[in-house]
Amino acid sequence: MSQRSRRRPIAEMNVVPYIDVMLVLLVIFMITAPLLTQGVKVELPKVAAEPMDESSREPLVITVDSSGQLFLNLGERPDAPIGEQLLVEKVAAVLRRQPDIPVLLRGDRNVDYGAVVRAMALLQEAGAPSIGMVTETPGAERRGRD
C-alpha cells in the first residue's frame, strides 16, 4: 500500500519565467531599435588612408573654422561664411549635377565636436553619399615651421 500512496514527481518544465524574460527583451529591443537608426552615416576606412590622386577633379570642401562658421570652396567668395540652409542648397545642387564628386569636410582642431557633427548632418541632408575628413599628416606642422 505504501507504493500506491507515493506521488510521482512532476517532470514538466515551467516556462513562465522564460516567457517573462522574452517579453522584457522584446520591449527593450522595441524601444532601442528606433534610436539606433538615427545618426550621421559615415563610411569608415577599411584600410590605411592614402592621399587623394592629384589628377582627380577638385573636390567639394566644406570647412568649419574655430568659431564654428561654415565655408564652402565654391562661389565668388570661398573665404566668406555661409549659412546652414544655403550650404545645404548649394551642395545639393552640385551633387545633382555631379553625383560622383568627392565631398570633404575640414574641421579646425579647436572647434567644438558638435559643430563638425552638425556640418556632417547638413551634408547628409544635402544628399552626400559619403564624406571624407581632411587631416594633416603627423609632422607636417613642424616641417612647415622649419
Image (cartoon, grey):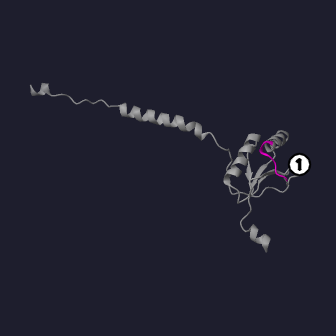
Is residue 114 within the magenta segment? no
Residue picked out by circle 1: 75
Up-down relation of residue 30 to residue 72 (above or below): above
Region of the chain picked out in magenta, as a range? 80-85
* Mark 1 nearby-residue class (10 Å; few <14, some 14–19, many ≥20): few
Q: Considering depth in this image, is 66 or 51 the residue closer to the camera?
A: 66
Is residue 84 within the magenta segment? yes
* Three-letter code, disc 1: Gly
Outermost residue to the right: 76
Up-down relation of residue 103 to residue 11 (above or below): below
Q: Position of residue 24 (x, y in %)?
A: 45, 35
Residue 7 appears left or right of 91: left
Q: Considering depth in this image, is 53 or 98 the residue closer to the camera?
A: 98
Outermost residue to the front: 67
Up-down relation of residue 96 to residue 133 (above or below): above
Q: Where is residue 133 in the image (x, y as percent from the top left)?
A: 73, 54
User: Which residue is at a point 10% across and 28% down the rendered structure image?
Assistant: 2
Q: In which quarter of the image is residue 86?
A: top right
Q: Where is residue 79 in the image (x, y as percent from the top left)?
A: 85, 55
Residue 1 appears left or right of 37: left
Outermost residue to the left: 1
